[in-house]
Structure formats: C-alpha cells, structure tokens
Image (spheres, helix red, strand yellow):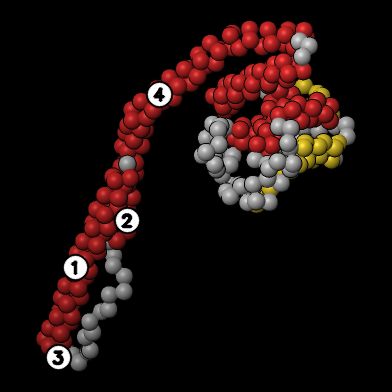
Amino acid sequence: MSIFLLLFIALGLLYYYKERNRLFQELKVLNKLEYAECRHMNKILGLSDTCEMKMIDTIDGLQRVYRDIAVAFIVLLLFLLPSGYYLAMISLRPMRESIETIDSFINGIVHDINTPLSVIKLNAQTMQLTLQETLHVEQNRRILQGIDEIESLEEQLLFSLKSERYVLDISEFDLDQLLQERTLFYKDVRKSVHVNYRGSMLHVKADKPLMKRMIDNIVHNAIKFSSRDSEVSIRLEGERLTIEDYGIGMKHPQEVFNKYYREDQSMKGLGLGLYIVASVAALHQLAIDLVSKPQRGTRFVIDLKNIKVI
C-alpha cells in the first residue's frame, strides 16, 4: 500500500508540473497575441497608445488540476483500503494461526502438568506432617517451594495468554493482611536477603489473586537481583505501596514492562514477570512509578487510590 501511495504522489507531482507548464505556455502565447494585436491596431488607426506585455501572476486552470488530483486520490484510496486490508489479513493469517497453535500448546502442557504436580504436592504436604528429622523436613520444604515456583510459572503463562481479555473477579479484602502473609513466604525464598514489611490496615476492592501475583512478581525480582545480606523493603503507607531493593538495578527501566523483555539474558526466566505487573496494574487502573539506577537499586511505587475502599 505504501508503494502505491508513493507511486501516486510521484505521478501526481508529474501531472501537476506538466499541466502547470502547459497552462503557463498557453497564457504566454495569449499575451503575445494580445500584444501583437494591440500594436497592429495602433498602426492601422494611427494611435500612439502604449502596448504592454502582461505579467503572469496567476495561472488560471490550476484549480481544475487540484480537483483532478484529489478525485484520483480518493478513487485510489477506495481501491487500496479494501485491497490492503484483504492482503494484510491473508499475509498475517499464518502468524495468527501460529500464535493460536502456541497458545493451545501452552494450555495443553499446563493442563497435563497440573495432575502429576498436584499428586506430588499433596504427598509432600502429607510427608511434612510426619517427618521428624530436621534435615528431611528442610528437604521436603524445598520440594514444596519448588512446586510453588512451578505453579507460579503456570499461572504467569496462562495469564499472559488471556491478559487482554481477562475478566476481573473483584472482592474486598485487607491488603495489609495479604502483605503480612506473603512476607512470611518471601522470607523463605532466599534466606540471605532480608525482606521487611511495614504497613497498616487498608481495605481495597480488587482481584485478590491478581494483586497477589503482581506483588509477588515485584518482590521476587527484588530478591533475585539483590546481593547477599541485602534488604528488600515493603511499605504500605496511605494510598501507596512501595517495594524497594538495593540490588543491581536496571539499565533500561522503561523497557522492563514489555513482554518477554529480559535485561540479563543469563538469568533464568521468560520475561513475563514485570509484563504481568503492568497488565494487572492496567486492569485495575493503577499507576506505577518505577525508579531504578544500576548498582544502586530499584523502587516501585504503586498508587492504590482507584481501588481503596473509602
């Protein structure tokens, strides 16, 4: 379509200059004829009137040229738009079918993994109640933690597939209580990083599992990219939730919310974590302020005023 438009512009300019030159030459010849006729009549009639050659300031007929070009452009658009749309649909069909196949494949894989994973988790939880030796208890706890990570990855994959058409399940809950519960879990993710929480009661109306997923993704990233004996701070103050770390920071913070983007290709992950954070925030109409500096840390500030229960 772009090629056709460029070709039309080139032909239109060519037509315009050709017609402009033709009309100019016609006016020039007409002026010469009028000048010659004036001198001839003066000679016949014996007059001494001065005959002057007219200056050509405007070229009559250019309005018709403009109209012809405009009509041709409209006709071209009427032809190109349906044709371009049809060709675009044909050319994008293989890509659309590939995306649908991949989505279907991921859904199938997640569904197939769920059954054996549930069996493993159930048995591990049962064993946790009966184990006596500290070493075995710790080993079993790590198994359960690994299962939680797999389930988390499943949730992120499934959400990324349907984020654009996701329907929120809104309920009222105390965000402070949720953060206290999650902080206990964060402390076991990586013992060498200290996760601290400070906040007060704040009732919100939101999709609780999605809010949990958004907060988990930010905190897990903070823990993963923090050095040993570093601190991750979570603060719920008024209408703002702040999650701050003092880790390696980000070189391109404006890019991290893009799907599949990863700053460090050597680290494991799919590049979905912060994309899901941005998607959940958008679904709840929450504003996120992100400040990050390399080797100095990262701070997320989430404005909760749109979901706060007044």
Q: Residues within 10 Å of mark 4 (few under 14, many from 20)?
A: few
**Residue 87 seen in the current view:** yes
Residue at 55%, 36% (x, y): give it.
267
Of labels 2 and 4, earlier in sequence is 2
User: Toward the viewer: 300 or 309?
Assistant: 300
Residue at 76%, 30% (x, y): give it.
187
User: Toward the viewer: 98 or 66?
Assistant: 98
**Separation of residues labelled 2 and 4 (CA atoms):** 47 Å
Q: Residues within 10 Å of mark 1 (few under 14, many from 20)?
A: few
Say if mark 2 contacts mark 1, CB within 8 Å: no
Relative vertical location of residue 39 with respect to residue 23 in this rendering, above or below: below
Does 278 sit left or right of 56 as displayed?
right
Relative vertical location of residue 8 with respect to residue 30 in this rendering, above or below: above
Does 40 sit left or right of 141 as displayed?
left
Of labels 2 and 1, earlier in sequence is 1
Amino acid type assigned to the residue bearing label 1 in the image: Glu
**Residue 298 seen in the current view:** no
Q: Quadrant of residue 102?
A: top left
Give the numbered dot on residue 98: 4
Amino acid type assigned to the residue bearing label 3 in the image: Gly
Say if mark 2 contacts mark 4, CB within 8 Å: no
Query: On the image, numbered disc 2 is attached to which residue?
Result: 66
Judging from the image, what secondary structure is the residue with disc 4 in?
helix
Q: Quadrant of residue 77?
A: top left
Residue at 50%, 13% (x, y): give it.
108
Judging from the image, what secondary structure is the residue with disc 3 in?
loop
